[in-house]
């Protein structure tokens, strides 16, 4: 799960700086994973400035396993009943709400590993494969 500019929707200079770091470090490290069998759930402020929203959606548009949700919620534990209460067709800006619901249902009976990946973090290329 990644948080981006929650409760800071109009801090444009900060948002652009964070987006630049995200594009240079976090996004490439996720795209380069040797295993793509994961769901990357990102949450951002529903009132995110249109300039930032457009740019963020643009850089995420071709990432098949990312879901960008317009929400300031950060539920702990993906198995919890309310873990995806903020996910709807209207709140999902990139990806599909049905994908999140399917992963949530599968998480009830399958092995689940969760981590917080901040927008300035990176992952070693084989992290997910080696788990």
Image (spheres, helix red, strand yellow):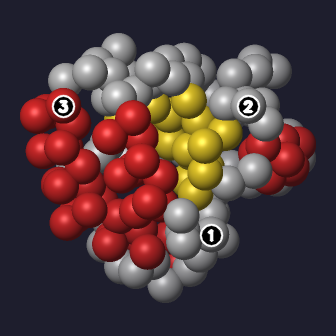
| Residue at 67% over, 30% down | 91
Q: What residue does disc 1 label? A: 64
- Where residue 26 appears, as percent x and y from the top left, is 30, 60
Quick one: 9 or 1, which is closer to the camera? 9
Q: Which mark is residue 12?
A: 3
Spatial separation of the CA atoms under disc 3 and disc 1: 27 Å
Q: What secondary structure is marked by label 3?
A: helix
| Residue at 40% over, 62% down | 59
**In this view, 35 is above or below 112:** below
Q: What secondary structure is marked by label 2?
A: loop
Report which quarter residue 5 is drawn in: top left
Give left or right: position of 55 versus 95: left
Q: Closer to the N terminus: mark 3 or mark 2?
A: 3
- Where residue 57 appears, as percent x and y from the top left, is 47, 52
Give left or right: position of 29 versus 92: left
- Where residue 128 appears, as percent x and y from the top left, is 50, 70
Q: What residue does disc 2 label? A: 90
């Amino acid at each position: 799960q990644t948080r981006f500019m929650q409760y800071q929707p109009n801090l444009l200079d900060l948002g652009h700086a964070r987006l630049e770091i995200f594009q240079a470090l976090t996004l490439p490290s996720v795209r380069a994973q040797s295993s793509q069998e994961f769901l990357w759930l990102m949450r951002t402020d529903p009132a995110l400035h249109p300039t930032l929203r457009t740019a963020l959606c643009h850089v995420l548009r071709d990432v098949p396993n990312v879901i960008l949700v317009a929400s300031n919620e950060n539920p702990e534990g993906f198995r919890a009943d309310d873990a995806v209460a903020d996910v709807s067709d209207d709140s999902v800006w990139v990806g599909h709400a049905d994908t999140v619901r399917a992963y949530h249902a599968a998480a009830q009976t399958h092995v689940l590993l969760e981590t917080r990946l901040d927008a300035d973090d990176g992952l070693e290329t084989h992290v997910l494969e080696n788990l």
